Amino acid sequence: MSKIVIVYHSGYGHTKKIAEAVAASAGAALLAIDAEGNLPEGGWEQLAAAKMIVFGSPTYMGGASWQFKKFADASSKPWFTQQWKDKLAAGFTNSATMNGDKLSTLHYFFTLSQQHSMLWVGTGLMPSNSKAATRNDVNYVGSFSGLMTVSPSDASPDEIPPGDIATAQAFGKRVAEVAAKVFG
């Protein structure tokens, strides 16, 4: 089993595309939450065996999807025994607007990780915020606490801005490097 597991929900495929980009750079396993908010068989065991759990969800109406929240509520069972204590945690979110209250979703993930006594990992990326910056630069959205990406509301998952895919890949590399430093 992979020591890094990305547990995520994707409503329309955009967040899945970001999860795949993070996973490819992190050498992580993907664990999709289905449309009913459930993990596949063996999912809880996969999370128990992981050294790092990366949370992912689209931001809908200022927060994580209800499907992700159902998963988070169900995580009270491992919480009760502190099964995830001292695991690394990180998170990412996607929505159609540049801000779109994505920070609320990342704060939700952070709070969830702290309830589980996990150790949070941010992006470690400087923002692209100079006059010369373009939409396709890495971390153009400028997030530090977790990965934020943007998918225009009329764009397919294959039309996610290349800079956001590159940012997801850089974030994946970051979580893998931190996991290697902490767990060897």
Image (spheres, grey):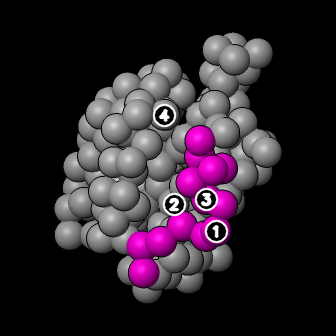
Residue at 59 percent across and 41 percent down: it is 48
- Of the image marks 4 and 2, the number of the one nearer the N terminus: 2
For badge 1, the amino acid type reads Glu
Is label 3 in a helix, a strand or a loop? Answer: helix
Between circles 4 and 2, the one closer to the viewer is: 4
Is label 2 in a helix, a strand or a loop? Answer: strand
Q: Residues within 10 Å of mark 3 (few under 14, many from 20)?
A: some
For badge 2, the amino acid type reads Tyr
For badge 3, the amino acid type reads Gly
Q: Which residue is mark 2?
A: 8
Q: Position of residue 70 (x, y in %)?
A: 33, 65
Query: Pointer 1 and pointer 3: residues touching (CB < 8 Å)?
Result: yes
Who is closer to the viewer here, 142 or 131?
Answer: 142
Magenta stretch: residue 41 in it?
yes
Q: Quick check: 183 left or right of 111?
A: right
**Residue stretch rendered in magenta on the structure:** 36-48
Q: Which residue is mark 3?
A: 43
Residue at 46 percent across and 26 percent down: it is 85
Residue at 66 percent across and 61 percent down: it is 42
In the drawing, what numbered circle is on residue 163? Answer: none
Who is closer to the viewer here, 68 or 173?
Answer: 68
Whole-number angstrom distance, CA of label 1 to CA of label 3: 5 Å
Q: Position of residue 136 (x, y in %)?
A: 57, 53
In the drawing, what numbered circle is on residue 83? Answer: 4
Residue 5 in view (yes/no): yes
Whole-number angstrom distance, CA of label 4 to CA of label 2: 19 Å
In the drawing, what numbered circle is on residue 41? Answer: 1
Between circles 1 and 2, the one closer to the viewer is: 1
